[in-house]
Image (cartoon, rainbow, N blue to C red):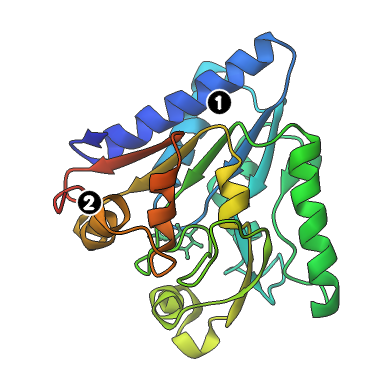
Amino acid sequence: TVFPNQEEASIAVANRIAALIKNKQEKGESAVLGLATGATPVKVYDELIRLHKEEGLSFKNVITFNLDEYYPMQPDAEQSYVYFMNRVLFNHVDIDRNNIHIPDGTLPEEQIHDYCLQYEKKISDLGGLDLQILGIGRTGHIGFNEPGSAPNSGTRLVTLDDLTRRDASRNFGGKENVPTKAITMGVGTIFKAREIILMAWNGTKAQIVKKAVEGAISAEVPATYLQLSDNVEFILDKDAASGL
Ligand code: GLP
């Protein structure tokens, strides 16, 4: 679906999330959301905060799982995704802190494998993700599933691509400060969501969006795996869609 601009597209995505939350509320159930970081979803979160403050949308029944976190990373570091999510969403809504899940970047490396299995189990014990939102990195990564990721991959520790670290360098004051690793939900984890929305804005994403939508399905561009699912919608602005 192509929108004229990021603002309108973000409002449409926020409305879809709000409808899901309310629908679950009416049934006395929880909404289990897969959330993303990066610049892409920020206006969606802005609109959700507005809906909370001005229209009484409650997050009391919302359970969230974030896609990824840098490794190693302290949660109170400004570059952490914990810090980011608090700043752009969680600090401004009535979500129960116990319902927030973000991969833990502080664990000793030998504990990560078990931790990742637990992360997956928590999601499946709750009945799976109702909706996963995604951005897309210029390498074609979703979450931090970089080129080479398998379609059935689970939550795990990964090594970041050089281009991804370069793109992140602004937030870290230089590429040398960007962690070389991250913990990410796998492609397989993402695929289990009942609904997936991938968002992309502006011309810098046009080339990778074209590859993701029209390119051959390949581990070289993990976002191409999304072509294999019937539950995926790409929501783009005009510029991100300009190569299609
Ligand atoms: C980051 C995140 C991804 C995100 C992507 C795009 O590395 N791990 O989840 O989709 O890069 O970032 P942005 O939205 O800032 O373009």
In the picture of the structure, the residue carrying the numbered disc 1 is 52
Q: Which residue is at the far top?
A: 26
Image coords of residue 3 (percent x, y)? 22, 35
In the picture of the structure, the residue carrying the numbered disc 2 is 240
Kind of residue at badge 1: His
Q: Is residue 125 above or below residue 138?
A: above
Kind of residue at badge 2: Ala
Task: Report the residue at 22% width, 62% height from top.
Answer: 207
Image coords of residue 153 (percent x, y)? 62, 60
Q: Nearer the viewer, residue 133 or 154?
A: 154
Where disc 1 sits, the SS reads: helix
- Crowding near the residue tagged with mark 2, few <14, some 14–19, many ≥20 C-alpha atoms within 10 Å: many
Q: Nearer the viewer, residue 79 or 198?
A: 198
Q: Is residue 182 left or right of residue 48?
A: right
Where disc 2 sits, the SS reads: loop
Q: Is residue 95 above or below residue 151?
A: above
Q: Nearer the viewer, residue 232 or 169?
A: 232
- Crowding near the residue tagged with mark 1, few <14, some 14–19, many ≥20 C-alpha atoms within 10 Å: some
